[in-house]
Image (spheres, rainbow, N blue to C red):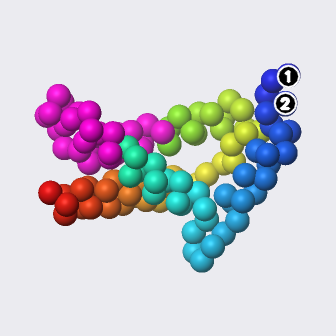
Amino acid sequence: MIFDILFNNPLRIQISEFLSSEMFIVDYWTLVHLFFGIILMFLIIKFKLERKFYVDKFLILSFFLVSYEIVEFFLFITNNRFFLPETLSNQLFDILIGLIGGGIYYLIRNSFK
């Protein structure tokens, strides 16, 4: 019942259509993954996760990005009305864009030190 209300919500449908429309070569979801990478790198540096685990920031970022793609895949399998299927190349591209976003934040942060 609640899933049907969420699925048929006109606002969700408009947002989904907007994000799926393509500009140039990529769609608007690319921007979402780019900003997600920026936000994750900010949080990794802010909470100093690399010092606790003694691993590189980009390795932690990669872990979170790959974990999200795995969760997204399983959400599609269990409830394919809300998630569109993605190809492996699309998932890898999403991870790459997230890493680029994290790299952008890292470079900007280090350039102001």
Residue in the image at 62% along x and 33% along y: 75
Q: Secondary structure at mark 2?
A: helix
Considering only vertical position in the picture, is 73 above or below 5?
A: below
Q: Which residue is mark 2?
A: 4
Per the image, the residue denoted by label 1 is 1
- The type of residue carrying mark 1 is Met
Magenta region: which residues? 41-68
Q: Position of residue 33 (x, y in %)?
A: 49, 53
Nearer to us in this view, 44 or 87: 44
Q: Is residue 89 visible?
A: no
Asked if 54 appears above or below 31 in the picture, the reply is: above
Quadrant occupied by the C terminus: bottom left
Answer with left or right where residue 31 lies relative to residue 95: right
Residue positioned 79% across, 46% down in the render:
11
Residue type pointed to by label 2: Asp
User: Is residue 47 rendered to the left or right of residue 27?
Assistant: left
Q: Quadrant of residue 76?
A: top right
